[in-house]
Image: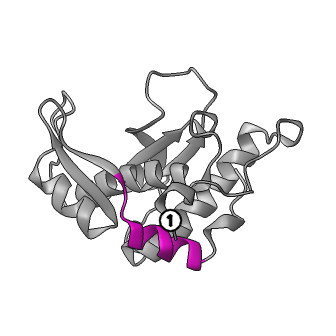
Amino acid sequence: MAQENIFNFSNRMEPSKAQSLEEQTEQLRGLYNFLNDKSFNGCLLPMPIITAVPHGLSDSKCWMAYCDVQNVEGVERRYKIYLCVDDFNRDVLAVSQALIYQMIHLFNVYRGILDCTPYGYHNEHFKVAAEAHGMMVTEHPIYGYSPTGLHPQMIEDLINAGIERFAL
């Protein structure tokens, strides 16, 4: 498959068929489960809180945070992933790339590995995990090891596994 065609899925939503943020969030949760099974062998549990956010809420298109949630057993730390799917033109592979990027951080957090400074410099730990989970990585002088995209084999694997069913 030619690289220039990989992001031309026909499942981009028409403006007249735009989903609500709740519907987008539900699709993102399904996509997270799909990617967790496909790329992380289901090890990223418990599932973080995943939320679709409106365009322009942040300078970032995708980010991760945590919060402490009260439950019957006490306080539990929960991670949150926020994505603005409109900033990715609702392209399922572009959204998948951003989601996998955050899942790599989550993978390292769950393993107790610090992969990024508070200033956004991504270290060797991030690089190793990113490459192991289907991303291409280059070194940037300010941001460290930054993902440059999904590896072509990962794209092919996701397409063959039916990723296009997630209408964002």
* Rendered location of residue 137, percent (x, y): 24, 53
Residue at the (55%, 70%) spot, across then down: 34
* Rendered location of residue 133, percent (x, y): 32, 67
* Rendered location of residue 14, percent (x, y): 82, 42
Magenta-drawn stretch contains 154? yes
* Above or below: residue 132 compared with residue 87: below
Determine which residue is flagged by label 1.
Answer: 2
Bounds of the magenta span? Answer: 149-161
Magenta-drawn stretch contains 135? no
Secondary structure at numbered mark 1: loop
Please state the total of marks drawn on the protein image. Answer: 1
Residue at the (16%, 35%) spot, across then down: 121
* Above or below: residue 157 compared with residue 11: below
Residue at the (22%, 62%) spot, across then down: 129
Would residue 61 be found to the left or right of residue 88 on screen?
left
Would residue 90 be found to the left or right of residue 34 on screen?
right
Which colour assignment does the render follow?
A: one colour
* Rendered location of residue 134, percent (x, y): 34, 66
Q: Main secondary structure of the magenta part?
A: helix
Image quadrant where residue 11 sits: bottom right
Would residue 92 be found to the left or right of residue 112 on screen?
right
Crowd tier of the residue under label 1, counting other residues whose Cα lies within 10 Å: few below 14, some 14–19, many 20 or above: few
Would residue 154 be found to the left or right of residue 50 on screen?
left
* Above or below: residue 141 compared with residue 96: above
Residue at the (45%, 44%) spot, across then down: 80
The residue lying furthest to the right in this view is: 16
Question: Label 1 is placed on what type of residue?
Answer: Ala
Q: Out of 8 and 79, give the one closest to the viewer.
A: 8
